[in-house]
Image: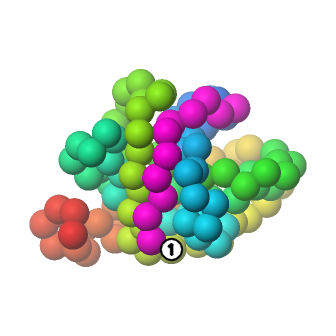
Amino acid sequence: MTIKGPVVTGAGRGRDLGFPTANIGVEDEASIPADGVYLAWFALDGGPDRAALLSVGTNPTFDGDRRTAEAYVLDVDEDMYSRHAQVRIVTLIRGQIKFDSIDALITQMQADERRGRELLAGLGDGEPR
């Protein structure tokens, strides 16, 4: 499954939490998978694939009501706004959860990143497929 669209401005919470995300202005709503956190390959403007964690859902911890797709690109912190993103989903890491606190959310995000890196290591050379 692939999600495509421009990187748009979001609420900025990911950066505040230590996980800056690229919010995807999804071009085809039907391309959005079920809510959850996924391991994915992320590319900007047709460039190389980079490993990412993709969060899909309403951000229930913040009482969101609109579904979004946000990618946390591992080991990358650059301005991505107004560029075109393509996100290819590799596998589901977990379903979406409403957390009781921001600290609990951050702890889970750290665990998600560790799990994503473990899954990448299991791909062998770690190169995109």
Query: Which residue is located at x 50 percent, y 65 percent?
Result: 38
Query: Which residue is located at x 31 percent, y 39 percent?
Result: 45
Q: Seen from this angle, which residue lies furthest front?
A: 28
On the question of residue 1 being in view, the answer is yes
Task: Please identify the quadrant where the N terminus is shown.
Answer: bottom left
> Is 18 placed above or below 79 here?
below
Residue 8 image-quadrant placement: top right
Q: Which SS class for mark 1?
A: strand
Q: For mark 1, does the 10 Å Cα neighbourhood hold few (<14), some (14 to 19), or many (20 or more) residues?
A: some
On the question of residue 52 being in view, the answer is no
Type of residue at label 1? Leu
Relative to 69, 81 lies left or right: left
Q: Position of residue 122 (x, y in %)?
A: 25, 75
- Colour pattern of the rendering: rainbow
Relative to 41, 122 lies left or right: left
Residue 84 image-quadrant placement: top left
Q: Position of residue 53 (x, y in %)?
A: 46, 56
Residue 44 image-quadrant placement: top left
Magenta residue check for 7:
yes
Q: Position of residue 126 (x, y in %)?
A: 19, 63
Q: Nearer the viewer, residue 46 or 106?
A: 46
Which span is picked out in magenta?
1-11
Q: Seen from this angle, which residue lies furthest left?
A: 125
Q: Nearer the viewer, residue 89 or 36?
A: 89
Residue at mark 1:
92
Task: Please identify the quadrant where the C terminus is shown.
Answer: bottom left
Query: Which residue is located at x 79 percent, y 60 percent?
Result: 98
Magenta residue check for 33:
no
Query: Which residue is located at x 49 percent, y 39 percent?
Result: 6
Relative to 77, 63 lies left or right: right
Q: Position of residue 7 (x, y in %)?
A: 50, 37
